[in-house]
């Protein structure tokens, strides 16, 4: 196994293993640049904030400030925080279900 010939942005040599038939590891192979770009773009979209998440985060910030200022009872704030966590988990489950559906469609296309 050979090491990658790539030089990282900080000037150090990459410690990755060169892919078969290449002088570079998969993370630095110029032939895979477009593929890496697509993957990074897709990843960024999956982490994009939804209006629902933004709303929940705003409410949590307001709740935090209200507790510190003594405007909201701590036990009531704890329950509200638990509900917010449940809402965030539900949003994550919805995202996973949607992603699974997308993968199933792509798999069906590949098999067909």
Image: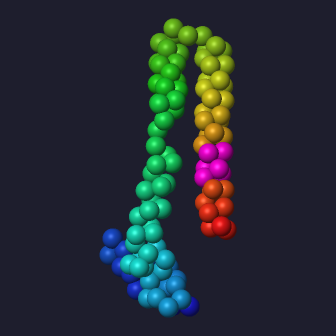
Count up the numbered dots. Answer: 0
Residue farthest along the front direction in this orientation: 112
Q: Give x and y (percent) for residue 66.
A: 49, 14
Q: Quadrant of residue 14?
A: bottom left
Quadrant of the rendering where the N terminus is positioned: bottom right
Q: Is residue 69 above or below residue 27?
A: above
Which residue is rendered at x = 50% and y = 21% of the image? 59
98 in the magenta segment: yes
Q: Give x and y (percent) for residue 92.
A: 62, 40
Whether residue 44 is visible: yes
Whether residue 57 is visible: no
Q: Nearer the viewer, residue 35 or 28?
A: 35
Which residue is rendered at x = 66% and y = 29% of the image? 86
Which residue is rendered at x = 63% and y = 39% of the image? 94
Query: Colour scheme of this structure image?
Result: rainbow
Quadrant of the rendering where the C terminus is positioned: bottom right
User: Range of the magenta residues?
Assistant: 97-102
Which residue is rendered at x = 51% and y = 8% of the image? 71
Q: Quadrant of residue 29?
A: bottom left
46 in the magenta segment: no
- Helix, strand or loop: magenta stretch: helix
Q: Give x and y (percent) for residue 4.
A: 45, 84
Q: Nearer the viewer, residue 100 or 51?
A: 100
């Amino acid at each position: 196994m050979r090491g990658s010939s790539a030089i990282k942005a900080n000037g150090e040599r990459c410690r990755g293993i060169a892919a078969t038939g290449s002088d570079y590891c998969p993370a630095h192979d110029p032939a895979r640049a477009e593929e890496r770009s697509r993957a990074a773009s897709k990843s960024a979209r999956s982490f994009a904030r939804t209006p629902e998440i933004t709303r929940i985060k705003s409410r949590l910030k307001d709740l935090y400030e209200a507790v510190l200022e003594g405007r909201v009872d701590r036990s009531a704030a704890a329950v509200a925080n638990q509900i917010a966590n449940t809402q965030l988990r539900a949003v994550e489950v919805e995202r996973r279900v949607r992603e699974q559906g997308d993968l199933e469609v792509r798999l069906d296309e590949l098999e067909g």
